[in-house]
Image (cartoon, helix red, strand yellow):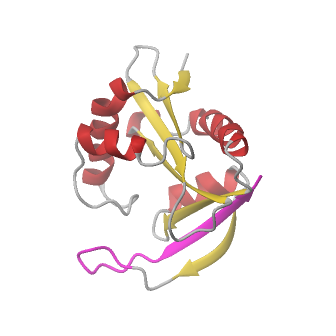
Amino acid sequence: MTVIRAARPQYAPAMAFLLNRVIAEGGSTAIEHPVTQDDMLTWMQDAPDRSCWHVALSQAGDLAEFQWAEPHPGLPRDAADIASFVCADHRQRGTGTELFQLTQAACRAHGYRWINAAIRSDNAGGLRFYARLGFTTWKTDPDARLCNGQVTGKTYKRFDL
């Protein structure tokens, strides 16, 4: 049974480890450089009154997935930007949907009216995941590039609260 709860600072090392695995795997995140637990802690504290962070723990108590939503300078004040990360061996279990239920509730409580997901256009799994949650495409940037110049495109999906 997966346990889902609000993220706490003690999860920062595990979140950094999981995110670094996703970065190393490639193809699914625009984050290109490894992160540290201090990076995670800083991100968690960037907008504590306007952000929400949730984790999913496996039966063994290991971090299997995490998700956050927060303000983004490129979005209106009534929009939150979401990010989701999952261990390769924990995909397709429905946990992301459960995390999103908590994220939706937290976003409503923070006064957001919609949630934005900025997804690499070459990330088929991410595009399917957000579509299954009810997100719809509202903007695309076919020329979006990674730092190394690789063109991946970017698809922006929206979920109205």
Where residue 114 appears, as percent x and y from the top left, is: 71, 58
Nearest to the observer: residue 123 or residue 82:
82
**Residue shown at 66% from the left, 38% from the top:** 106
Residue at 53 percent across and 27 percent down: it is 6
64 or 4: nearer the viewer: 4
Above or below: residue 107 compared with residue 80: above
**Residue pictured at 39% horizontal, 37% vertical:** 87
Count of numbered marks: 0
What x and y, as percent, mark residue 61? 40, 16
Q: Is residue 17 left or right of residue 48?
A: left
Residue 142: image x %, image y %?
49, 83
As drawn, the residue found furthest toward the front would be 49
| 67 vs 121, nearest the viewer | 67
Residue sitting at x 51%, y 44%: 68
**150 within the magenta span:** yes
Left or right of 23 in this view: 111: right
The image quadrant of residue 86 is top left
Q: In which quarter of the image is residue 155?
A: bottom right
Along the line of sight, the residue nearer the viewer: 52 or 90? 52
Residue at the bottom extreme?
Answer: 143
Q: Residue 152 location in percent, x, y?
A: 40, 75
The residue segment tinted magenta is: 145-161
Placement of the N terminus among the 4 image quadrants: top right
Q: Examine the structure image and report whether residue 85 is included in the region drawn in magenta.
A: no
